[in-house]
Image (cartoon, helix red, strand yellow):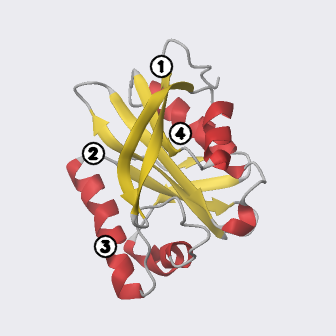
Amino acid sequence: MFLPLETERLLLRKVEQTDASFILEFFKNDDATKYMLYHFYHLDEVQIQMDYYENQYKNETGCYWLLQKKTTNESIGVIGLHNISKEHRKGEIGFWVLPQFTGLGYTTEVGRVIVDYCFTALNFNRVEATVETENFASQKVIEKLGFKYEGTFREFEMNNGKFIDLMMFASLAKEANIIK
């Protein structure tokens, strides 16, 4: 299921245990993770996330790529697929980049390659994305990727002690603009 990929500016490789310090760099930033359900502040805590990535690979229910700039090899974020269902030919996309790399088009650039990978290499019929109603930056990326808004799950999860709404977006293979 997993293949290394690349874009014009980025190399995408499997997230490995040796990336734990980088993963912690993101998860300990409260501003960056305000729309995430998890926050980690110490290397031993981030092991929960590293185990999650590894279990997703093993169970073939998800895969995650570390994003590295081609010019410097600097790690800038992660993009992944989770909730993969081979039976239903679908999965859910998720992504994050360090704050200093937001607004530079990296997430949209890499998102296009991952969505294309889903429809071509994985033979998905559907790629989903759930986004908090207040996370306007992620909504914008998802819309740039051609996903359609399908509805809102009201008070769907708890985040930082309060119920949050999640918006559901999806892209279908028959509607996708596959990269040639």
Q: Compare marks 2 and 1 and give the one earlier in the sequence.
A: 2
Q: Which residue is mark 2?
A: 61
- The image quarter in which residue 91 lies: top left
Mark 1 — residue? Answer: 172
Residue type (three-letter) at the residue carrying disc 1: Leu
**Looking at the image, is mark 2 or mark 4 earlier in the sequence?**
2
Q: Earlier in the sequence, mark 3 or mark 4?
A: 3
Q: CA distance from mark 2 to mark 3?
A: 17 Å
Q: CA distance from mark 3 to mark 4?
A: 25 Å
C-alpha distance separating marks 4 and 1: 14 Å
Foreground pick, 33 / 85: 33
Between residue 160 and residue 172, name the one nearer to us.
160
Please name the residue that numbered disc 4 is placed on. Answer: 114
Residues at badges 1 and 3 in contact (C-beta under 8 Å)?
A: no
Disc 3 designates what residue? 48
Secondary structure of the residue carrying tag 2 is loop
Query: Which residue does the image show at 38% across and 31% down from the upper left?
Result: 122
